[in-house]
Amino acid sequence: MSENRTEISDLGEFGLIDRLNEKVVIKNPSSLKGIGDDAAVIDAGDHVKVVSTDLLMEGVHFDLSYAPLPHLGFKAVAVNVSDIAAMNAIPKQITVSIGLSNRFSLEAVEALYEGIYAACDHYGVDLVGGDTTSSRSGLAISITAIGEAKKEQISYRSGAKENDILCVTGDLGGALVGLQILEREKQVFLANPDMKPDLEKYTVVTGRQLRPDARMDIVHELAELEVVPTSMMDISDGLASEIFHICKASGVGATIYEDKLPIDKQTFDTAVELNLDPITCVLNGGEDYELLFTIDQKDFAKLEKHPDVHFIGHVTKAEDGKLLVTKSGTGVQIKAQGWVHF
Ligand code: ADP
Ligand code: MG
């Protein structure tokens, strides 16, 4: 240890991970992909296994004053399945580790697991292990997901090529707007516990925040259409941040068009009500768990009519940078303001 002290907040989450990764030397030829993608890829003979893990901490990733425990259990599984989907692979097993404070009763743990079991059924995965410990700082949930794919079906972040088409699934910004509503209603409730939270108008956006669904449907449809994305990742930190990751890993640039960005009507209206710019919510809102991927132009016709895949732009040369073409036709540099917890 040197005498110097560097704050983690100066490095940021990605700076820290890069720093840790510098000293990693891969020893086993079966470790096909280590740190740096949505999941690691491991050679298993006639196929590959993909492995991803996530840690959710009370007070950082969720607030039990508005996150119902069954939803939280479902979400903890879904965010891991989303990372398996992001590799174009099929999830098969999960392990679940929990740190419990003494505030938790058996009934509360069972409510959490109700959501975990529901997600296991929904995604067709088996719960095969985990760990249980006590915690002095609230609830912690760590889930590891294991998936499978044929080697040639894996989509890395690093495969995007110039002229590929940039695609996103579903719509974006809802989870962030939902979080703002839940926070607002919590403050109203804290100020006046007799006030009933007014959430009925906002069920789409609050649902996006509390119980996201990983896009396994898209992974299955891509397989049926025989499309292997040239690159893919899930949108957990915000579209802008994920575009930066794909561009960095692939050594390319990207141009996207404001009028092509998908936003749900309730997300748009609620953003405006909250005095948030809807496009900023789409670009920088986290936790939507949609997929961002690139396809070769030859595959465009196969996906063109898909109701839930949106073509938002194309891949350019690295020196062209990352551009957003606004509705008025001006190109502006995209800033990657991800969802940073530090
Ligand atoms: P995602 O948002 O898709 O879950 P992250 O941004 O958390 O991915 O992680 C990016 C990469 O860094 C992944 O390959 C992940 O496994 C790796 N990673 C994250 N934290 C650590 C850590 N503490 N030690 C080693 N690898 C890590
Ligand atoms: Mg991911």
Image (cartoon, rainbow, N blue to C red):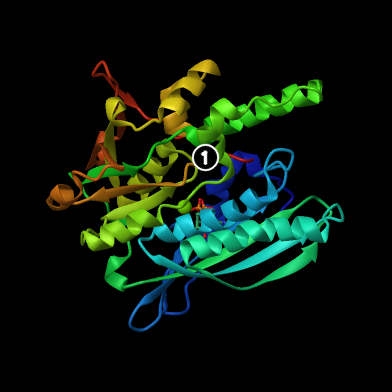
Q: Tell whether circle 1 marks a residue whose Cβ is less than 8 angstroms from ligand 2.
A: no
Amino acid type of disc 1? Arg
The location of residue 112, given as percent across then percent down, is 69, 56
Q: Which of 230 and 32 is in front in this view?
A: 230
- For the N terminus, give its image quadrant: bottom right
Q: Residue at x 46, y 20 (%)?
A: 269
Q: Which residue is drawn at 33% across and 82% down?
A: 46
**Circle 1 Cα neighbour tier, 10 Å, few/some/many (<14 / 14–19 / ≥20):** many
Q: Which of 331 and 142 is in front in this view?
A: 142
Q: Say which quarter of the image contains residue 104.
A: bottom right
Residue 199 vs 88, above or below: the answer is above
Which residue corresponds to mark 1?
A: 208
Q: Which of 294 and 271 is in front in this view?
A: 271
Q: Residue at x 75, y 67 (%)?
A: 132
- For the C terminus, give its image quadrant: top right
Residue 242 vs 156, above or below: the answer is above
For this view, does 165 lie left or right of residue 177? Answer: left
Q: For the view shown, which residue lies furthest in the bottom direction?
A: 45
Dot 1 lies on which element? Answer: helix
For this view, does 281 lie left or right of residue 130? Answer: left
Q: Say which quarter of the image contains residue 95.
A: bottom right
The location of residue 136, given as percent across then percent down, is 84, 54
Q: Which residue is drawn at 48% across and 59% down?
A: 81
Q: How many marks?
A: 1
Q: Nearer the viewer, residue 295 or 126?
A: 126
The location of residue 239, given as percent across then percent down, is 41, 38
Residue 285 visible, this orientation? no
The location of residue 127, given as percent across then percent down, is 59, 71
Residue 56 visible, this orientation? yes
